[in-house]
Image (spheres, rainbow, N blue to C red):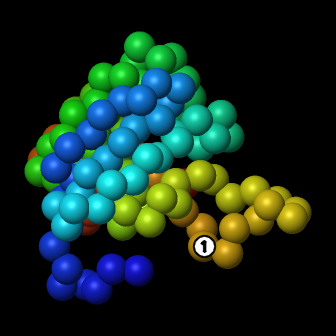
Amino acid sequence: MLADDFILDIIEAKSLGDFKIQLVFSNGVNRVIDFEPFLHNAAHLDIRKYLDPKLFEVFTIETGDLVWNDYELCFPLEDLYEGIISLPFSGSHAQTRKPFLTVCGHAEHDCRRLHKLL
């Protein structure tokens, strides 16, 4: 977990194919995030539409956040930094920390400050 006063941004994002994106954070940390399990397990159609590789590949970095379609889809920065974005599974695959997805349609919002929604 990051300290509340720690400032962190995504400074670079590169698609690696197969719904994987390599992220470079402002503190020099590199992470490869696999979004495919999250997208396949999402129930909401506005999220599942990003299973289309052509749509998924159209992401940008806006004020340090990774976003799709003018903030229609974005993830809390801390979750991306920790590499925890998949929906919780039941049974033996259950995660101890419940990750979140932020979905909004307002470009003026910062994903790090939005309410976290499933």
The percent position of residue 38, horizontal first and vertical second, equals 59, 43
Q: Residue, x 65% and y 34% (percent of image)?
A: 40
Q: Residue, x 22% and y 34% (percent of image)?
A: 60
In the displayed structure image, the side of residue 9 where residue 59 appears, left or right = right
| Quarter of the rendering containing residue 56 | top left
Query: Does 45 sit above or below residue 80?
Result: above
Q: Nearer the viewer, residue 44 or 25?
A: 25
Tell me if residue 61 can be seen: yes
Q: Residue furthest right?
A: 91
Query: Does 98 sit above or below residue 107?
Result: below
In the displayed structure image, the side of residue 72 where residue 34 appears, left or right = right
The percent position of residue 43, horizontal first and vertical second, equals 65, 38
- Which part of the image, by quadrant, shows the C terminus? bottom right
Q: Nearer the viewer, residue 7 or 113?
A: 7
Q: Residue, x 76% and y 65% (percent of image)?
A: 94
Q: Residue furthest top?
A: 54
Q: Mark 1 belongs to which amino acid?
A: Arg
Q: How many marks?
A: 1
Q: Residue, x 16% and y 73% (percent of image)?
A: 7
Numbered disc 1: secondary structure: loop
Tell me if residue 43 can be seen: no
How busy is the neighbourhood of tag 1: few (under 14 within 10 Å), some, or many (20 plus)?
Answer: few
> Label 1, on which residue?
97
Q: Nearer the viewer, residue 44 or 52?
A: 52
| Quarter of the rendering containing residue 62 | top left
The percent position of residue 51, horizontal first and vertical second, equals 54, 24
In the displayed structure image, the side of residue 22 where residue 9 appears, left or right = left
The percent position of residue 100, horizontal first and vertical second, equals 50, 59
- Which part of the image, by quadrant, shows the N terminus? bottom left
